[in-house]
Amino acid sequence: MSPHLPVTAEQIADAAVGAAEAGAAIVHLHARNPADGRPSQAPELFEPFLRSIKQRSDVVCNLTTGGAPGMTVEERIRPAATWRPEVASLNMGSMNFGLFPMLKRFKSFEHDWEPAMLESTRDIVFRNTYADIEHILTTLNEAGTRYEFECYDTSHLHNLHYFYSEGLVKGPLFIQTVFGLLGGIGSHPDEVLHMKRTADRLFGDDYRWSVLAAGRAQMPVAAMAAAMGGNVRVGLEDSLWIGPGRLAESNAQQVRQVRQIIEGLGLEVATPAEARDILHLKGGDKVAF
C-alpha cells in the first residue's frame, strides 16, 4: 500500500537503525518474505536484520508474536522463541481486526495480494485465547523476555490483570494501549482517558503506560499521552501517513515528528539504556542474535 514500507532484511535493518538515530529507544520488528512482501514469521528471515541492527545500534529490539491475523500461535511465537529478545509484543485478547476499510482509501497497491488480504478481515477473528497467551508467556518467560502488552480495549486490560494476579507476569508491566483500529476501542480523548484510568485502577504504579494509534489518530493520541506522562509508539505499521494526503517516507520521519511534540512539551526522549532501566530488561548481551 506504500512504496516506503521496508521488505528486505537490508531495508528493515536500515529502517530500524534510522528510527533509532531519530530518537526511538525500542524498535518493534516484523519480517516479510522478500520475494512478494507477505508477512512471515519464519525465524530465518529475522536473523539477518536482527544481527545487522545489533551491530549498528544499541536500540532495544522488540519482536512480534502477533505476526498477522490468521497465523497459528505456534507460527507467531517462533521468532521470539528462537532469538530470545529483550522484549516481545503480546496481544491480550481475541478480537475482530477490521482492516478492510482501507480498500476505500487506496487506489493502487504495491503487491497483488494486498486487496484480498484486506478484504479477508471482514470475516476473521484475530485469535488470542487464554491458552494461547499462557503458552507464549510460559515459553518466553524462560528466556527472560519481557513484554509489550498490546491492549486494544478495556477487556484486554482485565485479561492482563488475570495473568498478573496468577503470577505469570511480573511488574513493572509495559502496557501498550492501542486506539483507533476497527474492532478495538476508538481514539477519542475520552477513550484514551478511560483506558488510562482502568489501567491505573488495576495495576497502580506497577506498570509503564504507552500508546499507539492507527492512521490519522497517531500523532494526536501520542501528543495527549505524552502530555499525561505516558510513552509513545509510532511507525508505518500503525499509520502510513505523515500528514493529510502525505505518505510518510520512513519510520524515522514519524519518530522525528513525535519527538518534536515531546520536546515541545518540555520532555525528553529516553535512550535505549534508560528504556532498559525503566522496563527492567535483561540487556542486549543476553539475546540469541
Image (cartoon, rainbow, N blue to C red):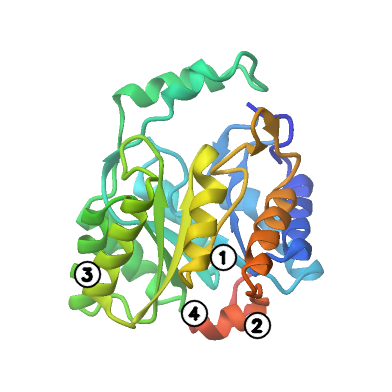
Type of amino acid at the residue the image marks with label 3:
His
SS state under label 4: helix
Type of amino acid at the residue the image marks with label 1:
Trp
Horizontal and vertical percent position of residue 228: 46, 69
Type of amino acid at the residue the image marks with label 4:
Leu
Q: Earlier in the sequence, mark 1 or mark 4?
A: 1
| Residue drawn at point x = 68 percent, y = 77 percent | 271
Q: Which residue is mark 2?
A: 273
Task: Please name which of the two marks, 2 or 1, marks the residue nearer to the observer.
Answer: 2
| Near-viewer residue (167 or 41) | 167
Q: Which residue is mark 4?
A: 279
Q: In the rendered structure, find residue 161 and report the number of the disc placed on it.
A: 3
CB under 8 Å between callouts 4 and 2? no
Note whether 27 is above or below 111 in the view shown. Answer: below
CB under 8 Å between callouts 1 and 3? no
Q: Earlier in the sequence, mark 2 or mark 1?
A: 1
Q: Earlier in the sequence, mark 3 or mark 2?
A: 3
| Residue drawn at point x = 67 percent, y = 57 percent | 47
**Other residues around mark 3 within 10 Å, as few (<14) / some (14–19) / many (≥20):** some
**Other residues around mark 2 within 10 Å, as few (<14) / some (14–19) / many (≥20):** some
Q: Which residue is mark 1?
A: 83
Cα separation between marks 3 and 2:
28 Å
CB under 8 Å between callouts 4 and 3? no
Cα separation between marks 1 and 4:
19 Å
| Residue drawn at point x = 27 percent, y = 76 percent | 203
| Residue drawn at point x = 26 percent, y = 62 percent | 157
Instruction: Please state, as top left, top right, bottom left or bottom right, where the N terminus lies in the image.
Output: top right
Task: Please name which of the two marks, 1 or 4, marks the residue nearer to the observer.
Answer: 4
